[in-house]
Amino acid sequence: MKKEFIYNFKVYYEDTDAGGVVYYANYLKFLERARSEAIYSIGFSNLDLKRTNDVIIVVKSCNINYIRPAKFEDKLSVHSSIISISKASFKMNQIIIRQEEKITEAEVVLVAINSSGKPTKLPEELLKKFNS
């Protein structure tokens, strides 16, 4: 995929532990929100994909590297790009950045399933947008 999606946000108190450091599992939430925003930014919605195509995009695997901790009130951005696509899945590289410093990097494999939980093809319209 040629385009990069950027999702900006601020760390809230609820995202941190008692020391004001982002709790490790919350990085997964940040990455998920960024992926959803990427879908929205190209004219799709996860809910509409389910309603109109019976497609649900789920995480198959996630390899995450925590480089530096994020802290309360940090302003962060998630840079997401698709690094490979097949008919029923795609792989994303997601990097969380604080003031031009990479603090977290993840490689996430996402697959399309239907409402019965069986693998299915990604809609052609979505694949076209991913490749443009």
Image (spheres, helix red, strand yellow):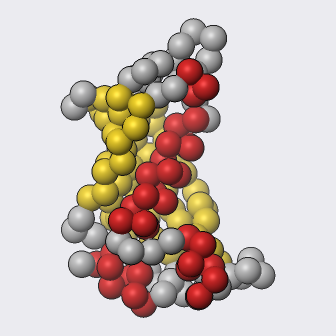
Residue drawn at point x = 52 percent, y = 52 percent: 32
User: Is 26 placed above or below 62 here?
Assistant: above
Residue drawn at point x = 44 percent, y = 46 percent: 106
Position of residue 112 measured from the top left corner of the image (x, y, whole percent): 58, 76
- Residue located farthest toward the top when viewing the structure as drawn: 19
- Residue located farthest toward the right when viewing the structure as drawn: 116
Q: Is residue 107 visible?
A: no
Position of residue 68 measured from the top left corner of the image (x, y, whole percent): 40, 23
User: Is 101 placed above or below 52 here?
Assistant: above
Q: How many marks?
A: 0
User: Is 119 placed above or below 4 here?
Assistant: below
Q: Is residue 91 visible?
A: yes
Describe residue 4's horizontal placement relative to residue 46 as left or right.
left
Quarter of the figure with the C terminus:
bottom left
Position of residue 69 measured from the top left corner of the image (x, y, whole percent): 44, 21
Q: Nearer the viewer, residue 88 or 132?
A: 132
Residue drawn at point x = 24 percent, y = 28 percent: 99
Position of residue 27 measured from the top left corner of the image (x, y, whole percent): 52, 37
Residue drawn at point x = 61 percent, y = 35 percent: 25
